[in-house]
Image: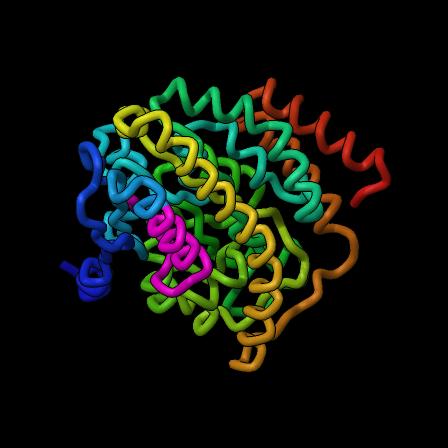
Amino acid sequence: MKPVAMMLALAVVTATPAIPHADGPVVPIRLATLVPTGSLWDKGLRQMASEWSQATQARVTVTIFPGGAMGDEATIVRKLRFDNPQAAALSGIGLARIDDAFNVFSTPFFLQSYDELDYVADALTPALRARLDRKGLVLLAWGHVGWAHLFSTIPVRTLEDLRRIRLFTAAGDDRMLRFYKANGFQARALPATDILIALTSGMIDGLPAPPAAALAFQWFRHTKFMVNTGLAPVIGAIVMTRKSWERIPETDRVSLLASAKAMERRLAEQVPRAERESIAEMQKRGLTVTAAEGGEWQSTGQSLASTLTGQMVPADILELALKARNEFRQRGNR
């Protein structure tokens, strides 16, 4: 086992204290995630897990496997099919491995603010929940992860600069790799858990990432530059296998959903603030924020987005997302 993997395995924690005299059968839930120990998401998951245990008198217990202790998101998604783990907190990359519809959120420059993201996500939730249900999964709650910015080992100000560096893309998604190459970018497909090693070895020169993640995973120590223009939101969500969800008494499910939604609201408030604080902290440690030159990022990005959506987002989901986004903007919001 690699030293990092060993450390992550040792970090596995039982997030809910044992409460004696549980009334009824206990439903143990193993929840896997890439979020690092001590992060906002990790703290939120622990609080939610504690609330689940208390609300059900320990009929539902949650053991959290943080920091990729159960593998990268491709591995976690594969394991969900076998109901082990029974739940996961996934980023948009992991969710897109379950269903292409989730790619709509990561389309470059498609969304412009957290408020717009919330509006579109609310509009899409029934359709996305139904898609997950058909694949044996239950959507419990959304969660902000942050807005992806480009982090790189050398300054990047133009799209031509971007085309000269080797970019990380998630392993296992051949269509995204082909998309990058078709548009002149040098992409390297790797497991997310190997990003730090790839940066250290020079295998990649940059990656899109939320600032809070770049700080938490220490990627910024090797990518000393960040483009100030945000590319796309990185959404997250908590999902559970329907098999395990249906083992939980219906009366308990109401409490669990309420707790998950409360976590969703907390993250919506905390993540944008943490994003600003993360950038400031990284700047203190040597990060340089560079300005994207001219309007080519937006214009070219939107052109690239049309290519992406045509290939990777189902037409009905794209139509719903466009309708919701246009409604939001027509109301004078941005």
Q: Residue 201: where, in percent of width, then height?
A: 33, 67
**Picture coordinates of residue 174 (x, y %)?**
40, 35
Q: What x and y, as percent, mark residue 30?
A: 25, 43
Q: Nearer the viewer, residue 267 or 202?
A: 267
Closest to the observer, 226 or 274: 274
Q: Residue at x 40, y 33 (%)?
A: 97
Residue 103 vertical placement versus 89 (above, below): above
- Say above or below: 207 vs 242: below
- Image-based side of 301 in relation to 82, left or right: right
Asked if the stretch drawn in magenta spans residue 77, the answer is no
Magenta residues span 29-51
The quadrant of the image that shows the N terminus is: bottom left
Q: At 84% from the left edge and 33% from the top edge, which residue is drawn?
A: 330
Given residues 322 and 159, the one toward you in this image is: 322
Q: How many marks?
A: 0
Q: Quadrant of residue 126?
A: top right
Instruction: Please identify the quadrant where the C terminus is shown.
Output: top right
**Would you identify the image quadrant in which residue 252 lies?**
top left
Q: Is residue 192 among what the camera can see?
A: no
Q: Is residue 48 found inside the magenta-colored segment of the image?
A: yes
Q: Is residue 287 left or right of residue 45?
A: right
Name the one closer to the observer, 57 or 114: 57
Residue at 54% x, 62% y is 211
Colour setup of the view: rainbow
Q: Relative to 106, is 190 above or below?
A: below
In x, y percent, where is residue 162?
59, 56
Residue shown at 27%/33% (left/top)? 80
Q: Is residue 216 above or below residue 23?
A: below
Residue 326 seen in the current view: yes
